[in-house]
Image (spheres, rainbow, N blue to C red):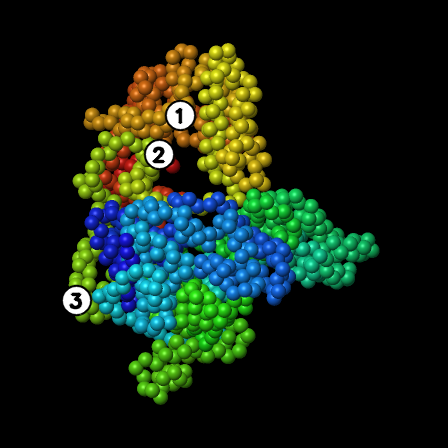
Amino acid sequence: MSLTIELLPDPAANDLRLTQLAADRSTPLERLNVLYGSGLQRLAAQRMLTEAAGGGLAAVYGFTPVDLAEAAARLGRPPERLAWPPGADLVALRRMLDSLDLDRFDAHAPGLAPALLRTLTDLREAALSPDDLPDGDIRTVFGAWRDIVATVEDRSSRYEDAISQTTPDAAYREALGGAPLIVSGIYDLTRVQRLLLARISEAVEVHMLLVAPDDDPRSPPLRTLDALRRETAARVIRSPIPTSSRAPERYFSSGDPTAEADEMASRILGLGRDGIAFHRVAILHQQGAPGDERHAASLARADIPVWRVGGRQIAATPPGHASLVLCRLLLAPTSVERSALIDWLSHRSLRDRPLDITRRPGVWDRIAVEAGLSHGLHTMRNSLEDHFEVSRDEGGRDLLQIISDLGERSRALEAAESWGHAADILIDALDDYIENRPDSVVLLDAVRTTINQLAGNDALGAAWTTQDGLTSIGRALESQVVRDPRRLVGGVNIGAATGPARGIRYDAIFAAGVAERVLPAAGRQDPLLGDDQRAAINARIPAALALQRERGDSDRHAWALMRRAAVRQFTASWSRRSSAVGGPARASALILEAASDSLPAEMRYSEQALSDAGRIERIASPGVADAEHRAAPADAVDSSAFNLALLQLPYADTRALLPELWPQADASLHARARRSARDFTEFDGRLDPELIEDWRPLEQSWTPAALETFVTCPYRFYLHYVIGARGEPAPQRVDRRARWMFDRLVHRILSSWVREYEHFKTDRTWFEYADSASYLNAVARRILDSDAGAAALGPPAGAAAARNEVMRILERARRREAANARDGWRPLAVHVSYDGAQVRVQGGRALRFRGMIDRIDIHVGGRHRALSLFTEPDPPDVRGFVNGSSFLSVAHLCALNQRGVAIRDAEVEHRAIDADGAVSSQVLAGESLATRGGSAAPSDGERLRRTLAVVADQLETANFIPNPGAPPRNRPNCARCTFESTCTPDLGRRYQFKARHDPERVRDLESLRRLRI
C-alpha cells in the first residue's frame, strides 16, 4: 500500500478535488472513506458532497483521527481500560505528585498540576517514552504517569492502542471496509497521528489532500509534509487545479470590542438581505470564550441566530457558574467568605424562593455585617445564631435557615461514603437552589450530567474526599462544553480561527480582533518544558514536539486559509482599544500587509496612510443598525442550494475552464436542476430498480424492524438495510448502564431459568417449578455474580439498586408465569430463530420475514403462543401492522405457521415489565386475521393485507424518498436518526413542496403514517 500527498493551493481546490474523487467512484455504492481534521469539517464536507451529488450521496464514511484510531484499536487486541470521569485525571495527578520525591517542582504549588497535565498530554501525543526525556522531574513524573494511565481510556490511549503492535493491519482494513482512505482538511499532525497515518498507509491506499497556500517552509502543512516524507515513503504530487480568485476584501477598525461586534452584526444583516444564508457566514477570532460571548450577544441583539463552533463552557454560563459556586460552598466550607455567600444568594440563576424563603439579598447583606460574619460557613452560622437570639430579625431567621441548610449538606458531603453518594447530595442541592428555567434546561442538564458522572470514580476504586470532589467538579465544569445540536444550520458560525472551522468555506468570513499580539499571538512557552528542551528532544526524534514559538506560523496559516475560504466576501477588523486592559491596540501586521497590496512603497504598512487611501475604514463611533435592519426577518434566507464554487466567480474565463477542470460539471448541474424540480426525481430517492444489483426485495427475508424503518423513512431503510451504512449513535455515558445490556441480562436469566426446567421436569410440573421462587433466584444470583452480569448492572455505585430492580422484574415475571401455568400454558422452545416465514400479498406475491422468537409456549388445548418479553413500559403494539409501526406480531405468526401450526391455533403475546414491576400484556390471536369486515370497518386481516401490499409495492419500485415526519419543516423523524448528517438541511421544505405537487409518490406511505398520529 502507499501514501500519496497531493498539494492544493486553497480550500476551493480541496473541495473541488474531494468532489472529483467522490464522483470518480465506479458505482454510487462504492465505499469512500474520508479522514477529516474535525467533526465540523466532516459535516461541512458531507453537506458539500451531498449537494454536489444532488442529494443522493451514499456509502461515504467520515472519520476524525481519534475516531479512526478507536475503531481500529477495538478491532485489534486492545488492553482492558476504564474510562475516567471528568476531572479524575487532575485528582489522580495530584495524588501521584504527593507520592513522588521531586527536586525542582513543588507538588502543592498552585497551578502546577493543570500545567503538568498539558505537558504530559503533549508528551503522550508525541509517542515518547521516559527514556527519550532528559533526567529531571519531568522524566520522573512522566514515567509515573504512564504507569497510571496504562489502564485508563482517554483520547491519547486510543492513539496508543491503535499504533500498538497488538493492532494488526487487518483491523485497519476492517475499520475502513477494505476501501482506500482520503485525507482532507488536515494541515498539521502530532507525531502519534503521523504514526497512525503511517500504519493506515501500510494497510490501505491513502490519498492525502494537503492545502498549502504558500511555499513558506515554516507553515504547518509544509512542516507536516516534511515530517511525512521523512517518516514514510510518501509520493508527493501537485494538483493541476489552479488557484481560485479571492473574494473582495474589506478592513475596518472600531473604537472598542463591543462596537466592533455590533458593526459585524449590522453587516451580516445586510448580507442576509442580499440572499446569503446566516449559516454560511462565520466570525472567526483568536479571543477565546469571551470573544464568542461578545459576538453572540451582539448577534442576539440583532435577532440573528448563532451557532458556537466550540460550544459554550459550562462554568461560563449563568446556571453553570451558580452551580460551581454552590459546589464550592458545600465542599470547602472553611474558605467561604461573607461577600461570596451574599453574591451567590443574589445570583440570577437561583430560585426566587429557595426552601420556600423569599430571597432578600440586600437585607441579608445588612444583617451579615451587623452579625459580624466573616468567613467559614459553620463559623458564620454560629455567629448568626448568636445575633438572632438578640435581634429576632425576620430576615435573620431566613438567612440562618439557608446557612444552616448549606451547613448540613456540607457535613453530609464530608461523611459521604462514596462518590455516587456525594453526587446525589450535590444533585439534591442543585434541585433545591438552582432555578430550572426554560432557557437554561440544556445547560442545567449538562451540569447534572457532569456531577452524576462523578460516580464513575467508584469504579476506579478512588476514595471520596471533599478536596478531591472540589478538584474534579471544578475541572469538569470549567472544561466541559455544551454544544448546540443544530450544528451547521444553526446560524452564524462563531469560533476560533485555528479551531474546527479552519479551512471550511463560507460565503462570508469575518476575521475579528486581528490586532497586534492577538493574531498572530505572542507565543508563551511551556514553563515546565521550554522550547529549548523541546528542540533538544526534536534533535533526537525529529518533529516530535511542537514549539510554542511556532504558534505564530500556525496563526499566519489560519489567516491565509480564511482569506481563501471566503467565497463572496472577506472582512477583517480590530478594536483600537484592548478588551483586556482598555489600553490602545494596533492593527496586526497581517491586516497591514494585506491592505497594502499594490500600493506604493511609501504607503505600505502605515495604518494612517491605508485609512486615507480608503483601504481601511475607520469607524469613529459604535455602529448602530437602523431600526428597519433590526426588524428584518432572520430566517428568510436560510437555504442550502448548491452553488458550485467556480460558477460563483464573476470572471467569464474561469467559467470557460470549468469543463476542463471538472468533466462532471454538466452532470452536477443536471442533478441540481432535477433536485429543484416540482416532482420527486431520482435525486430525491426514486431509484431505478434495475440500477440496484440483484434488487428483488420480495425474494429476500426482512426483519420486522427493517420494514418498520421503511414505513417511517425509506431513505433510512436504504442506508441501513440496502447498502449497509452505519450511523453515528450517541456515545454511551460512563456513569449510566447501557439499557440494551440490562435488557439482555433479564432475557438471559429468564431463558436460563426456562431451560433448566429440563432437569426437573421428571418430578415436577411446570406450574410447581414456576410457583417456587427458589429456582429462579438461584439462576439469577449465579448470572448476576458473574463478570458479564456485573458489567450489565452499570457503575458499581448503582449496582445494588440495579440488582434490586432486576430481582423485582424477575419476581413479577415468575408470578405471571405461574398464573399462565395454572391456566394450562407451558414452554415449548426458547430462542427460536426463523427465516423465510412468508405472508401472502396481493398479486400472488409474498413478503418474507426473519428473526427470533424469545419463547414459544403451548397450551393443553393445542394452541401455540409466540412470547416476546420487554423491559420497558411501552412495547410494540401487536396491532401495529395497521399503520406500519410494528410488524413483529405478524412475523411471529408467520413463523409459527412455518413450523406447522395452523393460523387459527397460533397467537402472539407482547409482555412488558417495567422497572417498578408492573406487568402489561397484549395478545393477538391468529384467527382474528382470518375474519372479514365491512367497507366502513375493515377487519384486522384486511388492514394487514392492505398495509403489506403498500410496503411490497413501494419496495419493488425502489422508492426511497426520505420522510422528515409531520410537520415536515420541523423534521421530527430526524431528531434521533443516526444518519441525520447525510440529509440536506432543506429536506423538510423540499419534501413539503414536492409532496404538494407530486402527491402520488408518497400518498400510500403517508396514508399509513397518518394513522399513527
Q: Mark 3 — residue?
A: 656
Q: Earlier in the sequence, mark 1 or mark 2?
A: 2
SS for dot 3? helix
Q: Is residue 471 left or right of residue 234?
A: right
**Amino acid type, mark 3:** Ala
Q: 984 or 544, which lies in front?
A: 544
Residue 274 lies, with reference to residue 78, above or below; the image says below
Q: Quadrant of the C terminus?
A: top left
Q: 203 or 768, which lies in front?
A: 203
Q: Is residue 830 visible?
A: yes
Q: Residue at x 40, y 71 (%)?
A: 553
Q: CA distance from mark 3 to mark 1?
A: 66 Å
Extreme-right residue of the structure: 390
Q: Position of residue 976 (x, y in %)?
A: 40, 44
Q: Residue at x 47, y 24 (%)?
A: 752
Q: Mark 1 — residue?
A: 831
Q: Position of residue 59 (x, y in %)?
A: 28, 47
Q: Mark 2 — residue?
A: 705
| Mark 3 vs mark 1: in front | 1
Q: Is residue 948 visible?
A: no
Q: CA distance from mark 2 to mark 3?
A: 51 Å
SS for dot 1? strand
Q: 783 or 571, which lies in front?
A: 783
Q: Residues within 10 Å of mark 1 (few under 14, many from 20)?
A: few
Q: Position of residue 91 (x, y in %)?
A: 59, 54
Q: CA distance from mark 1 to mark 2?
A: 18 Å
Q: Residue at x 29, y 71 (%)?
A: 246
SS for dot 2? helix
Q: Earlier in the sequence, mark 3 or mark 1?
A: 3
